[in-house]
Amino acid sequence: MFADPDGELRGTVTAESLQRVLDHYDAGDWRADRVLITGDLIQDDSAEAYARFRELLLPLNMRMHCVPGNHDIRELMRAVCRQPPFSYCAKEEIKDWLILGLDSCISGDAGGEISDDEFDRLEASISASKAKHILVCLHHPPVPMGSAWLDTVKLKNDEVFLAKLHESGRVRLLMFGHVHQEYEEDHDGILVVGTPSTCRQFKPGSEDFDVDDRPPAYRRITLHADGSINNDLIWVDD
Ligand SMILES: [Fe+2]
């Protein structure tokens, strides 16, 4: 989002594009209990852009878990995303599942990293929880995307991070943003999922930065008591 309601990113009015996604959800009959928002909420470093984000999402009227991305300003984002119904890098148990949001950002760097403090919080949250299944979300991709420029701004300690998640034996789903394209692969029992943007997309497999012409998108995820997952990527075409 931008402070300006007509603010454009790569030729698209971002507020209109997000509204299209929300309208698509609204018009369908699939209903969610939670929203997971995987970062890069704003583009212009302004508090007004976060206010616009809040205003557009509030009608969903449910809890919304947010993690920061490299374009976010933590102080401004926390001011909005720590107020219910939003939450910031939250931990929530729902029946058999623990949902955990991590901060993977490094100030002044488009790439990411799980800091020692976040590793500590991850370990403490997992060991304190009796949930049988765990969903972790963060902004940066915890795996290479096979796109040269994008792989320079991925999660720097991705292998250590994935190994840590495997140690628990309970992490079933790992979700990220940042890459503006579809990704979905099983990594030894953890389903790793990247969701395209609610605005413009990046071209998969590109050597250099390149914008794709695919439409905005969102995912519908259903978490089952036995640890299984339904996962549908929804492209919002005109
Ligand atoms: Fe990002």
Image: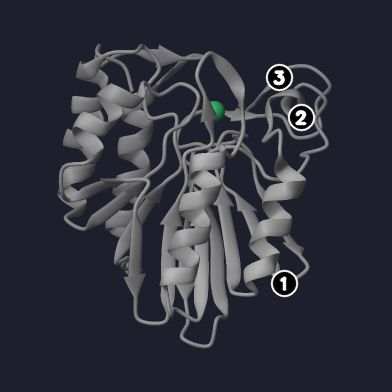
Left or right, 21 with reference to 137: left
Mark number displayed over residue 115: none
Task: Identify the residue at horizontal 37%, vertical 46% (top origin).
Answer: 89
The relative height of residue 57 versus residue 51 in the rendered view (above or below) is below
Amino acid type of disc 1?
Answer: Gly
Q: Secondary structure at mark 3?
A: loop
Q: Is residue 38 visible?
A: yes
Q: Quadrant of the N terminus?
A: top left
Residue tagged by mark 1? 189
User: Measured from the top left, where is residue 96 in percent x and y?
Assistant: 42, 82
Q: Foreground: 180 or 24?
A: 180
Residue 66 location, quadrant = top left
The relative height of residue 190 versus residue 179 in the rendered view (above or below) is below
Residue tagged by mark 3? 210
Residue tagged by mark 2? 151
Viewer-nearest of discs 3 and 1: 1
Q: For the residue carrying disc 3, how many other residues have a C-alpha within 10 Å: few (<14), some (14-19), or many (20+)?
A: few
Residue 19 location, quadrant = top left
Q: For the residue carrying disc 1, how many other residues have a C-alpha within 10 Å: few (<14), some (14-19), or many (20+)?
A: few
Distance of label 3 from label 1 (alpha carbons): 32 Å
Task: Identify the residue at horizontal 71%, vertical 39% (top origin).
Answer: 157
Residue 72 location, quadrant = top left
Distance of label 1 from label 2 (alpha carbons): 23 Å
Q: Secondary structure at mark 2?
A: helix
Q: Foreground: 95 or 44?
A: 95
Task: Identify the residue at horizontal 71%, vertical 19% (top origin).
Answer: 210
Task: Identify the residue at horizontal 26%, vertical 20% (top origin).
Answer: 49
